[in-house]
Image: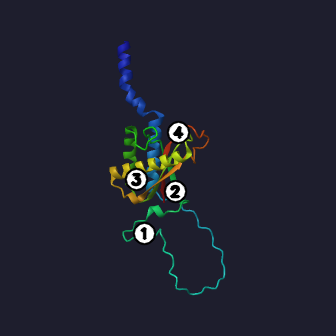
Amino acid sequence: MKHYLRFIMVAAMPAMLFMSPVFADDAQKIRDLERAISTPVADTPAPKKLRTRAIVFDSDEKPATDTKTPDVAGNINCSDLPIDSKSVAIDFSIQFKLGSAQISPASEKMLKEIAKVLALSNKCVLVEGHTDATGNVDQNNVLSKARADSVVNYIVEQSGLDRKRLVPTGKGSSEPLQNLNPRNPNNRRVVFKVVG
């Protein structure tokens, strides 16, 4: 009887793992990312401009070109987005080898899923690397940027996405999760910010 119960437990283990909060949470985050990619970011009304009177003199200066205008193919240069661009942020616990920017094989499946979702649209995506507060602040900043670069490289290699759409940046330990000790390992994450 004990062997029979052990067999049932071993056979049911994969199903129980799939139903665990970690996998359910990751599946929900993938759905949130898909929703952010496929729907426009809620528009906010532009602030009213004050009416002023001014005297304008002609000059020989050429007007500055808008760096956010589409190119001939209609693509926007995502690296020129302002820092405060309105976006939808979804964070993922992407695992890396200790003190390294090398992606752990345990996170490759998740990154492949993320790549599939990002391929559904041409929106710009800011890819932010974050660390916890252990270690040197400057090294954490460098490491978080290197990890964001690794994630972008992996996604581009897996999906063939235009690299210009993905903007990697390192935040170090400057933005810990709310109500969490800055040294908590859960602060090590990669945040995908979809810009509408």
Give residue 87's mark.
Answer: 2
Front disc: 4 or 2: 4
The residue where tag 4 is placed is 186
Q: 4 or 69, which lies in front?
A: 69
**Amino acid beneath label 3:** Leu
Mark 4 crowd level (few <14, some 14–19, many ≥20, 10 Å Cα): some
Amino acid type indicated by mark 1: Pro
Q: Position of residue 129 (x, y in %)?
A: 49, 48
**What residue appears at the point 57 percent right and 41 percent down from the top-left corner?**
133
Q: Do the residues bearing badges 1 and 4 touch, measured as CB atoms within 8 Å? A: no
Q: Determine whether, in the image, residue 145 is placed left or right of residue 183.
A: left
Look at label 4 and name its amino acid. Asn
- Name the residue carrying label 1: 70
Task: Give me the C-alpha separation between circle 1 and circle 3.
Answer: 20 Å
Which of the marked residues, 2 or 3, is nearer the chain's N terminus? 2
Q: Which residue is mark 3?
A: 118
Distance between the Cα atoms at labels 3 and 4? 24 Å
Q: CA distance from mark 1 to mark 4?
A: 38 Å
- Identify the secondary structure beneath mark 2: strand
Marks 4 and 2, how far apart at CA: 22 Å
User: Camera-side residue: 50 or 175?
Assistant: 175
The residue positioned 48% from the left and 35% from the top of the image is: 21
At x 56% / y 87%, what residue is drawn?
Answer: 58
For the residues marked 2 and 3, what is the alpha-carbon distance in whole angstroms?
Answer: 14 Å
Q: Residues within 10 Å of mark 3 (few under 14, many from 20)?
A: many
